[in-house]
Amino acid sequence: MAKLEARGISKSFRGGGGYTLRALGGIDLAVESGEFVCLVGPSGCGKSTFLRIVAGLDAPDAGEVVFDGRAVRGTGPERIMVFQEGALFPWLSVGDNVSFGLRVNGVPAAERAEISARYLEMMQLGQFARYHPHQLSTGMRQRVAIARALAMDPDVLLMDEPFAALDTQTRYTLIGEMQEIWQRTKKTILFVTHNVAESAALASRVVVFGNRPSRVRTEFRIDSPRPRHAEDGSLASIQREILAALRPEVRRQEGLDG
Amino acid sequence: MDRRAAARRAAFYAALVMSWQAASSAGALPPGLLPSPLDVAADLARGAADSSLLAGVATTLWRLLAGLAIAIGAGVALGVAMARVPAVNETAGSLVLGLQSIPSIAWVPVALIWFGVGDAGIVFVTAVGAVFAVTTSIYSSVRNIPPHYLEAARNMGARGGHLVTLVLLPAAFPHMISGFKQGWAFAWRGVVGAEMLFSFLGLGFLLNVGRHTVDISQVVAVLVVIMAMGMAVDAALFRRLEDRVRERWGLR
């Protein structure tokens, strides 16, 4: 049985003047426990919308999200999202940010501190627990956001272009760290990105979304040994294949937009 | 505020007071209508010496703070409810807008009928005059919270009281400070207005005494005291709070 399943998810948005934008046109996707799935697609294809629906932050117009065999509605501690800009709470210290989820779920303070310290250590931020988010670099903040999500010990990590705002060097470092975390924690990960090299380095499976109203267009399994680097020569051919799968989509979209 | 700005400001006030005094000394200002700074200073000194002024300040201040505390407490609760519960906004929201257009002085008859002449009535006028301005300001500061904060919190399981106290209020806090400032300004209008109409104590009462004894020095002295208190609280409380919050939140 799949860990997480999306069945026929569709979603439209009402624009101005009665114009309706059909974002998702029936997404079917099954993710096995411990998979690292990257979702790629042309910009504006609705992959982030899909992730938000899986997280329960938005409701689909049709279809359902199934977790461990039962349909879920709304958010749940088993599906935790890492936002593009981190969404760390600026009024809390780094340590309190990481233990926030534990706090609202009634975990005692001593245990919270221990768990928070453990995940900050895992993200190599052990000595920054007392800092405030704005005192850290963008890359460090994103690592805190990942630690905050991991501290909830979710079954599924949902990551919405978490490295998009980072410089290349930092992104490469985090691509390496993310693989280690995945191997250590055995989490199921659903990771949205528009960066093909990033997806090829991270994923055990890359799922390509089509244009609006988007469906799953095709997918690639990647079994190359880890740790992988975004610029590994051995990934070049798979990157080309993903790009080739995306190209008609991107062109169609450009034709549409132009 | 840097040193240069402070120096510039001090120079401005010194020049203002000196030219005012010079105009008075030259006989350019009718003494019965506009006192000289020295007259005002003498009146302030007299008021301080016989402690009438200090008593007035103390009385007005506690009424003001009591009214403001009520206004902030109720305004935060109502503003948050309006921002988060559509039904509350659709119903009470329009009422709040209507009530906000009532000047605090217009509540004086209500206060007199409900509470009679006394502190309770003045605190009532102060609170009711400030509460709706605080409410609308809190409402918009909660509405302007970046949605990701609330989504992340909800995703991690924050609900109800936790969501309000641990996320909503701190996230809105930098903007809420301006709501508190508004409340402070409106509370002053309410308390002095009410004191002028029905009190035998407080700064508003002292203004009235000045009016009845045709003592323009006393009137101006009380105005100066009110202005100075406003500026002092802004510098010592609101400005400092704002700076600390901005630093903590990393807002530049």
Image (cartoon, coloured by chain):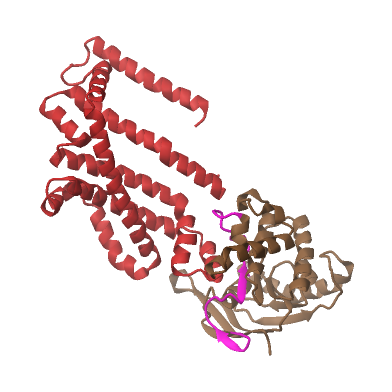
Chain colours: A brown, B red
Magenta range is A66-93
Task: Give yes or no for residue A14 being in the magenta stretch.
Answer: no
Number of marks = 0
Q: Is residue A83 visible?
A: no
Say if A225 sits above or below A85 in the image. Answer: below
Report whether A182 appears left or right of B118: right
Q: What secondary structure characterizes most of the magenta part?
A: loop
Q: Is residue A255 left or right of residue B2?
A: right
Depth order, front residue of B2/A230: B2
Which residue is painted at 75% across and 68% down in the image?
A181
Residue most toward the right?
A: A233
Question: Where does residue A245 sit, x and y in percent of width and height?
Answer: 75, 77
| Residue A96 percent location from the top left of the image | 59, 58
Q: Is residue B242 above or below residue A53?
A: above
* Residue B53 visible: yes
| Residue A80 on the magenta segment | yes
Residue B88 quadrant: bottom left
The residue under the point 33% across, 60% down is: B78
